[in-house]
Image (cartoon, rainbow, N blue to C red):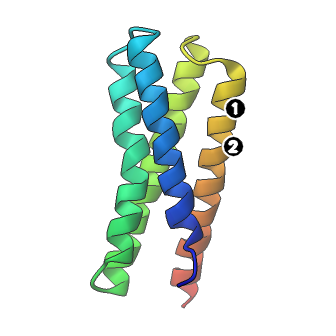
């Protein structure tokens, strides 16, 4: 079975988001933004999984679109956490690089489906 790059990357990103959530809760005592980023950041991979198990091409595309929107939202929360000094610039840049790669991959898949 061939590796699914978006499935692998979104899962790895979810694990990073969970670590970030734990850090924000225990070290920074931040409870509101941390829950937001946990929800949106882990939702990306969950919707990718749902897309893969989709019943039709339309269902696949719809779940993929939700993943894309959640990724955009997650990027927003990362930037907000960085700019409010909850996240170190280096850590936030690594997460932004990851999320931008995920956005490019999802966007590319969406473009392929539209052409097909």
**Residues at badges 2 and 1 in contact (C-beta under 8 Å)?**
yes
**How many residues crowd mark 1 within 10 Å: few (<14), some (14–19), many (20+)?**
some
- Which label was assigned to residue 97? 2
Q: Residue at x 42, y 56 (%)?
A: 45
Label 2: element kind: helix
Residue positioned most to the front: 1
Q: Position of residue 19 (x, y in %)?
A: 47, 31
Label 1: element kind: helix
The residue carrying mark 1 is 93
For the residue pair 58 and 86, the one nearer the viewer reads as 86
Q: Residue at x 58, y 18 (%)?
A: 87
| Left or right of 51 on screen, residue 85 | right
Quadrant of the drawing holding the C terminus: bottom right
Is 72 placed above or below 56 here? above
**Residue 46 location, quadrant:** bottom left
Residue positioned most to the bottom: 116
Is 47 placed above or below 23 here? below
For the residue pair 107 and 95, the one nearer the viewer reads as 95
**How many residues crowd mark 2 within 10 Å: few (<14), some (14–19), many (20+)?**
few
Give the alpha-carbon distance from disc 2 to disc 1, as whole Å: 6 Å
| Left or right of 45 on screen, residue 35 | left
Q: Residue at x 59, y 56 (%)?
A: 102
**Residue 63 location, quadrant:** bottom left
**Residue 67 location, quadrant:** bottom left
Q: Position of residue 53 (x, y in %)?
A: 32, 77
Is 89 placed above or below 113 here? above
Q: Residue at x 33, y 16 (%)?
A: 31
- Which label was assigned to residue 115? none
| Left or right of 15 on screen, residue 43 | left
Q: Position of residue 33 (x, y in %)?
A: 39, 22
For the residue pair 37 and 16, the one nearer the viewer reads as 16
């Amino acid at each position: 079975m061939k590796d699914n790059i978006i499935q692998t990357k979104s899962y790895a990103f979810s694990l990073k988001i969970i670590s970030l959530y734990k850090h924000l809760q225990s070290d920074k005592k931040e409870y509101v933004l941390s829950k937001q980023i946990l929800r949106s950041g882990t939702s990306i991979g969950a919707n990718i999984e749902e897309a893969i198990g989709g019943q039709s091409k339309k269902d696949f595309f719809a779940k993929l679109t939700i993943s894309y929107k959640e990724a955009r939202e997650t990027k927003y929360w990362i930037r907000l956490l960085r700019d409010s000094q909850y996240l170190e610039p280096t850590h936030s840049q690594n997460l932004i690089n990851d999320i931008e790669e995920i956005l490019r991959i999802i966007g590319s898949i969406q473009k392929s489906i539209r052409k097909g």
